[in-house]
Amino acid sequence: MIHTVTISAIQQASPTVKIFQLDDADSAFHYLAGQWIDLYVDIQGKTEVGGYSMTSTPTTHGHLELAIKSSTRHPVTRWLHEQAQVGDQVRISDGQGVFFYQAEMSPRVVLVGAGVGVTPLISIFRYIGASLPQTDATLIYSIPSTDEFLFQEDIEKISQLPNMHHIVTLTQADNTWQGKTGRIDAALFKAAGMSDETLYYLCGPQGMVEDVSAVLTSIDVPASRIIYEKWW
Ligand SMILES: Cc1cc2nc3c(=O)[nH]c(=O)nc-3n(C[C@H](O)[C@H](O)[C@H](O)COP(=O)(O)OP(=O)(O)OC[C@H]3O[C@@H](n4cnc5c(N)ncnc54)[C@H](O)[C@@H]3O)c2cc1C
């Protein structure tokens, strides 16, 4: 089903990423935490489509949120960054895809993201924080630089809950950063705590997803407990 929604806010969240709030007054719109939508825009008389993950949680009613990294190549992404205004209408599908979390799937998740690939993971993190105190969740988030730390305030606030944790690692040198540096490796997963029931959700650039799944395999995590979101 296709829903017409209105852009109600646009925020420059980092040098490369804008956050869009969409009014979903249409109560039939439906998604699960971690899913993505097709977003349709008419550009120069032609309907173009882009796929974007929700960053909001389905427990928030009335609006949904997207975080989109700029691209001059992709027509919809470019339109959203360069043309879109508050009040514009766009069309969206319902939530799609198998990259989602629901409580019955496992009592423990580790959400592993790099760069703007954190988008579906923050949806799951917010969802668990808002409504699932029995689920233990750790967000492992790799960022190139401190100014690309998306959702920092929210991640730190949610992590005050006893079941919610995060580890952020920076990949470029920065003297002002007190936290972890370097790539996501086996030691980070061990620091996050491992169990036979943990589900691992991965989203990021292709090389990162391949490297992280090789790391997980090397520490005996079966493929059945690794869930990927591929944007390529
Ligand atoms: C299911 C799905 C969900 C998506 N959700 C989002 C979203 O929430 N926000 C957003 O900005 N874009 C998202 N995209 C990508 C978006 O639809 C366009 O493909 C993108 O804007 C195109 O940019 P580009 O041509 O400059 O690609 P490039 O920047 O050249 O990237 C090449 C491919 O790798 C992917 N990629 C690059 N960096 C990352 C990363 N850190 N994590 C994951 N994939 C990466 C790109 O999306 C693209 O498909 C999603 C795509 C899919 C298929």
Image (cartoon, rainbow, N blue to C red):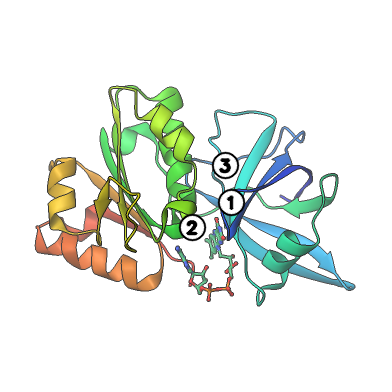
Q: Check the image and report above or below for 93 versus 29.
A: below
Circle 3 residue = 31
Residue under label 1, please give it.
67
Farthest bottom residue in view: 73
Under tag 3, what secondary structure? loop
In the picture shown, does residue 53 fall above or below 71? above
Pinpoint residue 186: horizontal percent, then vertical percent: 14, 57
The secondary element bearing badge 1 is classed as strand
Tag 3 near tag 1, CB within 8 Å: no
Whether residues under marks 1 and 2 lie with C-beta atoms below 8 angstroms apart, the answer is yes
**Image coords of residue 219 (percent x, y):** 9, 58
| Closest to the observer, 1 or 188 | 188
| Ligand 1 contact, mark 1 (Cβ < 8 Å) | yes
Viewed as shown, does residue 75 lie left or right of 228?
Answer: right
Residue, x 30% and y 52% (percent of image)? 169
- Residue 55 position, x and y percent, is 54, 44
Q: State the mark number for residue 114.
A: none
Q: Residues within 10 Å of mark 3 (few under 14, many from 20)?
A: some
Side (left or right) of 8 relative to 108: right
For mark 2, what is the residue? 116
Quarter location, residue 65:
top right
Gap in angstroms between the C-alphas marked 2 and 3: 20 Å
Q: Amino acid at mark 2?
A: Val
